[in-house]
Amino acid sequence: MLKISSPPVDGHVGFWPTSDDPSHWNYWRREALAYTSGLTATAYAGTGITTADLLESTVRPDGLVEFWLADVSGTDGFSWSVPRIARFAYELGTGQARWVGRVPGTDWLSRQWLAQYLVEGPSLSVRIQDNFWDHPRVTGWRASVRERRLGWLWPNRERISRRRAGRSAYALPSRCLASESSGQ
């Protein structure tokens, strides 16, 4: 598979603006650097999560970065069962927990990604309507969780992100999550 990373374009209008700033949530060189540095091959090693092998990476004459990745067989994530998604969540958490307190010092490694993404990313175009809470995938949650907790998160996401920016994790306020949601 060929992937091409491109720098930001002045006047870009859209959901995925890139940036030259390595600390930006969508730094345009981050994925290529993760592959060429070997981070993608080692970050989740031993957790059950693997990535495609990097076959080749080149900076083109026009400045774009292209990288060729090996084909990966298997079932795509959209076809996973709920237990498989749960296993992936466990694997992801296991892999991330190993990095607590020892994050590599590379300037291009994302910091504060979630906070930046929620404030600057595609979510700016999302409009939550009252009838969205009636969707079958949402109605399985108790009404108190849907309305008072999940419903509270979206309009308060920027404030939560700012408040959590100086902390090491993006733990949600405890009042947003409760044991009553554990039935899901």
Image (cartoon, rainbow, N blue to C red):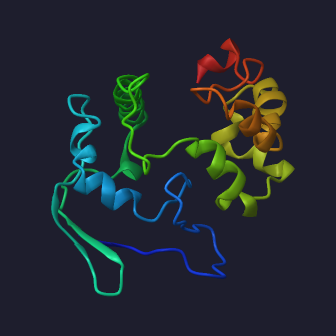
Q: Nearer the viewer, residue 107 or 71?
A: 107
| Residue 7 image position (x, y, % from top left) | 47, 74
> For the view shown, which residue lies furthest in the top direction?
179
Residue 173 coordinates in the image, percent (x, y): 73, 23
- Where, quadrant-wise, is the C terminus in this rendering? top right
Residue 46 is at least partly visible in this image: yes
- Name of the residue lying farthest toward the bottom: 62
Q: Residue at the spot x=58%, y=27% of the render? A: 169
Residue 102 occupies which quadrant of the picture? top left
x%, y% of residue 66? Answer: 28, 74
Please tell me which residue is depicted at 36% across the width and 24% down the height of the picture.
94
**Where does the image place residue 179, in percent across and percent down from the top left?**
67, 12
Number of numbered discs: 0
Eyeballing the image, is 135 above or below 89?
Answer: below
Looking at the image, residue 119 sits to the left or right of residue 4; the answer is: right
Asked whether 149 or 172 is in front, the reply is: 172
- Compared to residue 35, the image places residue 95 above or below, namely above
